[in-house]
Image (cartoon, rainbow, N blue to C red):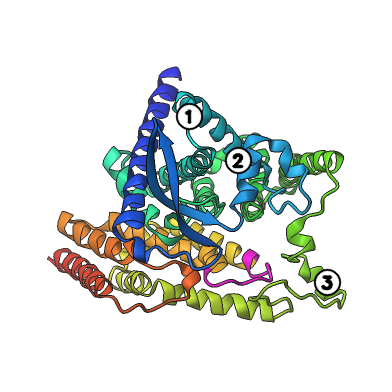
Amino acid sequence: MNKFLIKNSSFFFKCLIIGLLTSLALYFIMFNIFDESTDYYICTKVVDYQLDFFSNQINYKYTNSCDEESYFLPLESLGTIYEIKDFQYQNRPIFLVLAWLVHKFLSLLFYFFNLNQILLYQLTYFMLQNLILTITVLLFNNIFNIKNTTLNYFYTYLLLLISPIYKWTIFEAGHHTQTGLLILFAIYTYKNRYIFKYNFLPILIGILYLSHRSFIVLFLYLLLILLYEHRNNLLVQFRKILYFIIAFLFPIISYQIFKNIVSAVEDHNIEVYKQFFWVFDYIRGIETKGVTGWYCQTIPSNFKCYLLDTVNVLKYLYIPAGIVFLYILLNKNFYLKNKEQLNSLIHITFLVSLFWSFIGWYPPVRFSFYSSGHFLIIISILIFYNMSTKYGKLSYFTGYFLFFILHNHYNGEIYFPSKSIYLFSLIFYLIAIFYEKKVSVK
């Protein structure tokens, strides 16, 4: 057992180092080589910073977000989140605690380097995002039975890293990277249903909910699996379901009690933005209006807005989306080969879509990407591994890389940019697909 843990932990840390180096390479590309194409459009801008390093001044570029202060403040003192009125991230304590722990580790690691606090804050979230992405990659490779090698880890990591949610969040203090983890965790649990025998599972989901509220979808998904698995034994079903619900709610209720004791602050997202809770106002006939644009807080306008934004995801990912459709059309065995995992992916994507359709606020692409966007990225990467020849893989990888490496941020609402790099991307994609088709016919 000890050998197993040591072997897997060493591989995890090796993967983390590979991920950090790959992310640093992406940083160099985005902020130094193609810095003119690195535009976050809304809330975040790229600014120049100065680093004092052994009496030398080093200039570097990094993101500056309009809400990063709320993420940075708890790094010095966790109590800050209960002292500030309308602290919007008070209901993500686990995410903030993890950031705090990473910050403490880095502070000790770089103790003698006397780094600027702002750089330590930036490194903290950069490290945390890489930790999340490392776990996500390992889950992906396990789910789709991809051989656990360093090279395969690097491929999956890079392909995920340059996809929009990760590419534009890896250098920010944001929580979006957890949305891909949710989907893959759901598929992993469905594939490995023996995990349900562990009583800690629903407690873990409850803890994850305190990091990102969308993990309630994972809870509901697993609850549906339990209902189906024990459909022929009502007594067993009742006991397991009851425990699953109570265990899930335990960390959430415990935190709410703790929060009410130490702070009287209201839920910022509910009180100010009416996220999800606008539905209760609608049922009671109370009109709600958002504080900014992109609001649809009536039924069925919320579904219409979310559907239109899902169409925008397809437009935003127009080449990869078209290639996924074409590949599946030409390769009937693709679905059969991965039937169990793809069925689970479809189910969880539908539930995630349903969940976010009720948020009542629909900025461009963002919440729709959490469902259909991740769906397309996961299928795209799976197609890469499904390529049977090294030339097909190389061509497909090149097409994927060319599309995403300079692809604009989704906040820009730019769906069909006229750059020659997209034409080359399409050419390499098509070469890969038709070359593979030709080889398979032979």
Q: Are marks 2 and 1 in contact (CB under 8 Å)?
A: no
Label 3 packing within 10 angstroms: few (<14), some (14-19), many (20+) = some
Q: Amino acid at mark 2?
A: Phe
Q: Amino acid at mark 3?
A: Asp
Residue farthest toward the front in the current orientation of the protein: 55
Q: Nearer the viewer, residue 285 or 169?
A: 169
**Residue assigned mark 3:** 281
Quadrant placement of the C terminus: bottom left
Residue 6: image quadrant is top left
Callout 2: helix, strand or loop?
helix
Residue 118 point in image, percent of width and height: 53, 42
Label 1 packing within 10 angstroms: few (<14), some (14-19), many (20+) = few
> Mark 3 or mark 2: which is in front?
3
* Residue span colored magenta: 355-365
Q: Is residue 230 inside the magenta stretch?
A: no
Task: Write the residue at 52% across / 60% down.
Answer: 44
Q: Nearer the viewer, residue 173 or 33?
A: 33
Give the CA separation, mark 3 to mark 2.
Answer: 37 Å
In the shown orientation, is residue 356 left or right of residue 83? left
What secondary structure is the magenta-colored segment mainly?
loop
Residue 191 point in image, percent of width and height: 49, 47
Residue 76 point in image, percent of width and height: 64, 35
**Residue assigned mark 2:** 196
Which mark sits nearer the N-terminus, 2 or 1?
A: 1
Q: Amino acid at mark 1?
A: Asn
**Residue assigned mark 1:** 114
Callout 1: helix, strand or loop?
loop
